[in-house]
Amino acid sequence: IQAHNNLGGALLNKGNTSEAISHYKKAIELQPDYFQAHNNLGNALLNKGNTSEAISHYKTAIEIKPNDPDAHNNLGVALMNKGNTNEAISHYKRAIELNPEYPQAHNNFGSALLNKGNTNEAISHYKTAIELNPDYAQAHNNLGFALGAEGNNEEAISHFKMAVELKPDLVDAHYNLGFALGAEGNNEEAISHYKMAIKFNPDHFWAHNNLGRIMVQKGAIQEAVDHYRATVRLRPDLD
C-alpha cells in the first residue's frame, strides 16, 4: 500500500501527474482510511485542475486526521481556487492554530484576507511568513503587492526585489516590480522587469501592454507597436 503512495510521490515530482493519481487511487482502494494518500491525491488532482475532486480528498484526509495542519492548508488552497474565501480562511486559521510556525499557511491566509479587503491583517500574516522563512519569495512578492495597495511603494519595491533575487523566474514579482518602478518614474528598470516577466511568460498581456505604453513615451514606436500587437492578440477585449 505504502509503495503505491511512495511511487505516486516520485511520479508527481517527475511531472507524471496522471500516473501519480492512479497510484494514489490504488493505495486508497487498498486502504480507504490512508490519510497520506488522500492528502497526496488531493495535491495531484489540484495540480491537474480537478479542484472539486481535490477538495473531496482533502476533506476525507481531515476526517481521518482532523489535526493535520497540512491538510487544512491544502484544503484552504483548493477552496480559494473555487472562490470559497470564507471557508478557506477557516481552514488556514485552523492550520495556524495547529502549527503557528507554518509559513505557507500564514502566506495563504494573507492572500485570502487581501481578497476580502483586510489589507493590514494580510500584511501582518505575510510578514510572519517571512519571519518564519526569510527566503520565501512568494511571500515577499505578496507582501510587496499588499504594501503597494496601501501606498507604501518604496517598501513594496524592496520586497519585489527580494522576491526576484530569491526566485529569478517568479513572473508576478517581475511584473509587480516593473509596475512599481514605473510608478516611481524609473522606466528603464521597469522595462527590464517587464521584459523578464515576458521572458518567463510570453503570454503576459499586462506586461506587453505596459511595455507598449513606456515605449511610446520613449519614442520607440515600432517596439511599442510590437508589444501592443501582442496585447491585442492575447487579450482582444482589454480596456
Image (cartoon, rainbow, N blue to C red):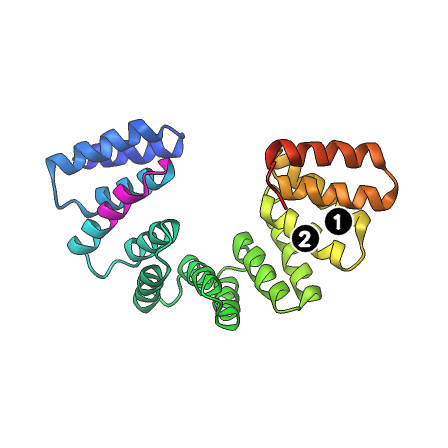
Q: Is residue 110 left or right of residue 172?
A: left
What amino acid is at disc 1? Ala
**Which image quadrant: the N terminus?**
top left
Write the residue at 81% across / 47% down.
Answer: 188
Disc 2 from disc 1: Cα separation: 7 Å
| Magenta span | 48-58
Residue 145 figure quarter? bottom right
User: Circle 1 — which element?
Assistant: helix
What amino acid is at disc 2? Leu
Residue 17 figure quarter? top left
Q: Is disc 2 in contact with disc 1, using a CB cutoff of under 8 Å?
A: yes
The numbered dot on residue 190 is 1
Q: Is residue 238 above or below residue 202?
A: below
Label 2: which residue? 177
Q: Is residue 51 above or below residue 131?
A: above
- Nearer to the camera, 28 or 108: 108
- Nearer to the camera, 72 or 184: 184
Q: Is residue 71 left or right of residue 162?
A: left
Write the residue at 40% across / 30% down.
Answer: 15
Determine if the magenta segment contains residue 135: no
Write the residue at 24% across / 29% down.
Answer: 22
